[in-house]
Amino acid sequence: MACEDWRAKLDLYVDGELASADTAALGAHLRGCSLCASDVLERVQLKRSVQIAGKRYQPSAQLRNKIVKSVARRTRFGFSWRFAAVAALVALVSAVALNSYFGRQRVARQHVYSELADLHVGTLASATPLDVLSSDRHTVKPWFQGKIPFTFNLPELQGSEFTLIGGRVAYLEQSAGAHLIFQVRQHKISLFIFPERGTEMPQPPSGPVNQLSFNVDSWTQNGLRYFVVGDANANDIRALSKLLGDAR
């Protein structure tokens, strides 16, 4: 299919609304067409910006006053309206604080996932995506020595559906980490490993989530944060994550 035909489907691809057969075919096309891959990257970045902007709502003073007055009107026997107003205000402030905390966590997580989606797409669209090419974990893992400030384990993939392709050094928020590419059938999956940096990185959700048409899984282990990103289905992402988490 020509580029012009694929471009009409890029928005559906980014929104995760493209049929599975077309998704696989378009993914294969993007790996060989830097122009279309660049268009996808622009759409992903735009979608990320819109999502982040949409999470910045904070309750207004008018809304807080409306809630306080509503509670005061309903107050009857046992305590005064002033006590009810104070209690309602305390509850509101607590709820806003919790919502603000979880909102910041959600926005920060989406920001990180969007950055990783950009790295995933950009790497696959690059003419030279990897710095070390090998399916042998005993070749790929030692290559990172001296290039990143930590070490990690890779699983034995023999007997599984996954194949290690290679790796490169990647950067997330000025932190150097490992970026490895795996393949399952026709799908490429990125594994990112970075040092765990406490509150600077949001806490991961439980299990794979869908982010900008990609399935993403994340967890912490031995002081490291792992991210698995790809257009493979959630079961494949979960299976690779388990292999990585069990690696010794």
Image (spheres, rainbow, N blue to C red):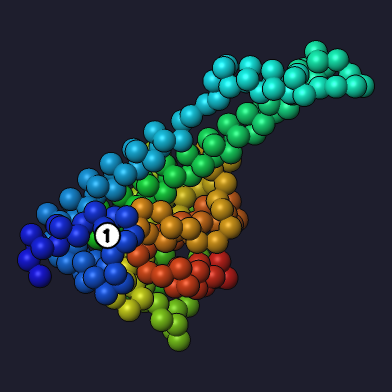
Amino acid under disc 1: Tyr
**Residue 147 visible in the displayed image:** no
- Is 110 in front, or is 246? 110
- Is 130 in front, or is 53? 53
x%, y% of residue 43?
Answer: 24, 47
Residue lying at 36% horizontally and 53% vertically, measured from the top left: 212
**From the viewer's perspective, is 79 left or right of 134?**
right
Q: Residue furthest bottom?
A: 159
Residue lying at 92% horizontally and 21% vertically, measured from the top left: 78
Looking at the image, residue 197 lies above or below residue 223: above
Location of mark 1 (residue): 13
Residue lying at 12% horizontally and 54% vertically, measured from the top left: 35
x%, y% of residue 127?
Answer: 16, 59
**From the viewer's perspective, is 53 left or right of 223?**
left
**Residue 17 visible in the displayed image:** yes
x%, y% of residue 18?
Answer: 28, 64
